[in-house]
Amino acid sequence: MGPGFDPWTDFGLVGEACAGWAPLEQCDRLLIVVGVTGVGKTTCLGHLAEKVPMRLLPNRRSVADRVIIPLMQRELGLASQPVSDRLERFRLTAGYRDRFPGGVAHALSRLRFDPSRCEGLIAFDGLRGISELSWAVEHFPRARFLALYAPGVVRLQRLLARGGDFDRTAPRPESMPGVDGLMVDLPGLDRLMSAEDLSRLCALPAVAELPPGTVAEKAAILLEEAKNYDPDTTLEVLRKTLGPERFLSLDTSKLSAEEVAEGVKDWIS
């Protein structure tokens, strides 16, 4: 899947798909990947695609851009335009979830796929939170669910390292210096990581050389996400709801992406 890969080639929305395309709910090869920012969903799926026949659905970001954000902008009377600020995207997707129970899972149900071209697994990256997953379990009864997770400080380190344009927010006011300042400026951050772990992260040379405010910006993304999605509770609900044939959870801080892909390959075989 190179730079020119278009995930919408074999998938479309209700009213857009070609004749003969099927509702995604009818797919018995659907793999829904569950996990919050920085757990390694995209990387692990890339390794999995090298091991098993697989097609990637348009990912969460793409579905939000094409389905969720335009609808919410119309409903709120906002100008129709791309939204890059992560906090604003959280606000709009939360509004969609209030409007349509299931949130991104509901948006996913509006997709159709071309059975003649989609062989092997059809994977979606990814769903989050109890409301999305509860809705998906009910409305995608043939799907399997792969949950990837990692500690908050590990996810923050990955977010700092990847430096993507998507992982940006509006400029933040200057806060108190140091880790203590971050903890004061970002209430609730201590629930994602300890001050000791954050201090060790900030002491790494690659992190210490980042522009001022970068750690606060990325930590704010994780914190805002945590307000909308509780990964620990979500995993527990899935464990209790689904048996091992439909649910697998893996810690990506302890397993490499290659090891995760091997584990998933064995699970689906």
Image (cartoon, grey):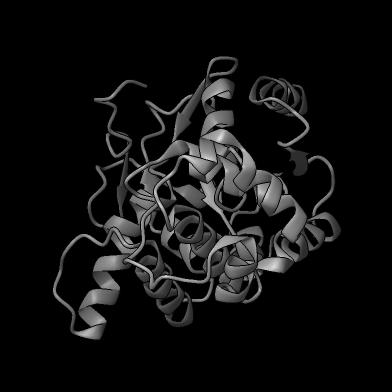
Q: Is residue 143 visible in this depiction of the protein?
A: no
Give percent across and percent down for residue 166: 35, 49
Q: Which residue is depicted at the point 38% across and 69% down?
A: 172
Q: Is residue 31 visible in this depiction of the protein?
A: yes
Image height of 37 relative to 57, above or below: below
Q: Residue furthest top?
A: 51
Give percent across and percent down for residue 97: 47, 75
Classify the position of the C terminus by image quarter.
top right
Left or right of 163 in this view: 31: right
Q: Quadrant of residue 73?
A: bottom left
Of 29 and 165, nearer the camera is: 165
Q: Which residue is depicted at the point 36% across and 54% down?
A: 63
Classify the position of the N terminus by image quarter.
top left
Image height of 115 relative to 222, above or below: above
Give percent across and percent down for residue 44: 59, 30
Q: Quadrant of residue 130?
A: bottom right
Left or right of 98 in this view: 155: right
